[in-house]
Image (spheres, rainbow, N blue to C red):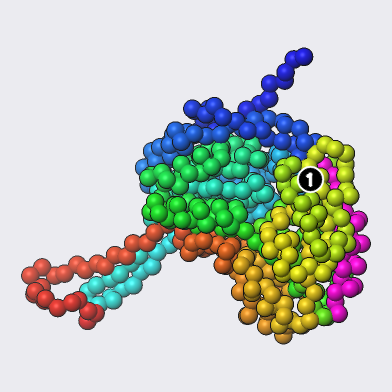
Amino acid sequence: MSTVQLETISHRIGGAASTGGSSRTTPVYDPATGREQRQVLLAEPADVDAAVQAAKAAFAKWRDVSVTRRARVMFKFRELVDQHTDELARIISSEHGKTFDDARGEVVRGMEVVEFACGIAELTKGEFSEQVSTGVDLHSFRQPLGVCAGITPFNFPIMVPMWMHPIAIATGNTFVLKPSERDPSVSNLIAELYAEAGLPDGVFNVVHGDKVAVDALLDHPDVAAISFVGSTPIAKYVHERATAAGKRVQALGGAKNHAIVMPDADLDFATNHLIAAGYGSAGQRCMAISIAVAVGDAGDELVERLRAKALSIRVGPGLEPDSEMGPVVTAAARDRVVGYVERTTADVVVDGREHSLGSDGFWVGPTLLDNVTTDMEVYRDEVFGPLLGVVRVATLDDAIALINANPYANGTAIFTDSGQAAREFQRRIEVGMIGVNVPIPVPMAFYSFGGWKDSLFGDHHIHGPEGVTFYTRAKVVTTRWPDQGHETTNMHFPTAS
């Protein structure tokens, strides 16, 4: 029997495909069939060093490219991403499993950050103050850091990297991306689109890999900054190791996002949006709603409506037009979700284990649990799958206290018709991103994305204005042009006069 030779996905270093010194590979699966469809190289430290050195060499010239030329590259890159939206979405769907429409939405949301980066000339303007003291002026400006690196997760293989590299590159840095090895192909196409847009070789590089590549980036002396999105334990590890190496770090961690449903809420509206927020992308979103907090007598009717809606979701391969929810990304992800359902003592209202499209593929259906309590494993952990739990409380105060006691603080929402309740909620809640009748409150690109507590390690949120701040550092210049021969020596500390 002949063996079919699978495609091997290579690195992209210095503007060209590179196999470097990599000999290790790992499979890339089609989650809908469970079949291995290609292999991806896993970088060794030497491969990471080659990418960093290419980026370092490119930085010497790219930092001096005018801000208007950098903006023009971003405008061209944005147009190319727009032209290739469907192709990018198909690649994402084939390796991640999410539906084509969901993948297409991811591309569009990533493109919004590119659009923000197109305004880099405005975003990096400095400040000037005349005559701060007699004959003295003051001005400030920002400069790029150097080689920056991004380590990104499987769940948004184009959008999350685009939270990083467009802003880093537009501000004059060069970039090394280490995407997830589970769905790596789209990152190589992005590198090709950058090249077509006129970005010089070495400014954007892609190295595929596992912990070996991650550690090599965290330790490399020529990497100035690390951006990371992933689970909380790894975010903490990245932050500690990279800051110990003297790097600037933003590390976004896990989530356990709650949505409060008040008795006065429109339950049809809340149900529709909770279903989308809980089961969209098979729950594999850092902003997915995994806990609905039913206040007062909202609980029974809410659970019944959620049950009916969950049972009606069309589960199928992501590239089939009628599919509303695809598989999870790996067999391990499927088994993890199933394990939580098997072990729970909550009431299983809809059982995703009963959903099957045959033995192939990484399938688990929408799961709905009622009467979840805070001591349960399924409440404490970030399940990261199509599992929505309902917790019941008596009052809004109880709901706020419940959410504030959780160690995760990425996103949260409230469904209500009461402006007073909404205002009270957004003022008292200890969470970084808040939605009022919006279950997935991901900010637009001209705001910054980031949670609190165990959902963020580092001082800066990602993309938006804080992204510009993260990828640059400030200089302040005090200037005086004295008249010749009219200065005297003063030994006191200088003050304004």
Quadrant position of the C terminus in the picture: bottom left
Looking at the picture, how far across and down is residue 199, in whole percent?
A: 50, 40
Q: For the residue carrying disc 1, how many other residues have a C-alpha within 10 Å: few (<14), some (14-19), or many (20+)?
A: many
Residue labelled with disc 1: 327
Judged from this view, the residue extending furthest toward the bottom is 420
312 inside magenta stretch: yes
Tell me the residue at 52%/29% (across/down).
Answer: 22
Looking at the picture, how far across and down is residue 87, in whole percent?
A: 71, 39
Tell me the residue at 61%/74% (across/down).
Answer: 430
Residue 322 vs 257, above or below: the answer is above
Of residues 284 and 236, which is closer to you in this image?
A: 236
> Residue 449's quadrant in the figure?
bottom right
Mainly helix, strand or loop, the magenta region?
A: helix
> Residue 286's quadrant in the figure?
bottom right
Residue 64 in sight here = yes
Tell me the residue at 91%/56% (across/down).
Answer: 312
Q: What amino acid type should be assigned to the residue bearing mark 1?
A: Pro
Tell me the residue at 85%/38% (across/down).
Answer: 359
Looking at the picture, how far across and down is residue 149, in whole percent?
A: 48, 47
In this picture, residue 61 sits left or right of residue 72? left
Residue 303 vs 119, above or below: the answer is below
Of residues 280 and 342, which is closer to you in this image?
A: 342
Looking at the picture, how far across and down is residue 248, in whole percent?
A: 43, 56
Of residues 159 and 219, which is closer to you in this image?
A: 219
Q: What is the span of residues highlighted in magenta in the rendered image?
A: 297-319
Residue 100 in sight here = no
In this picture, residue 484 sits left or right of residue 85? left
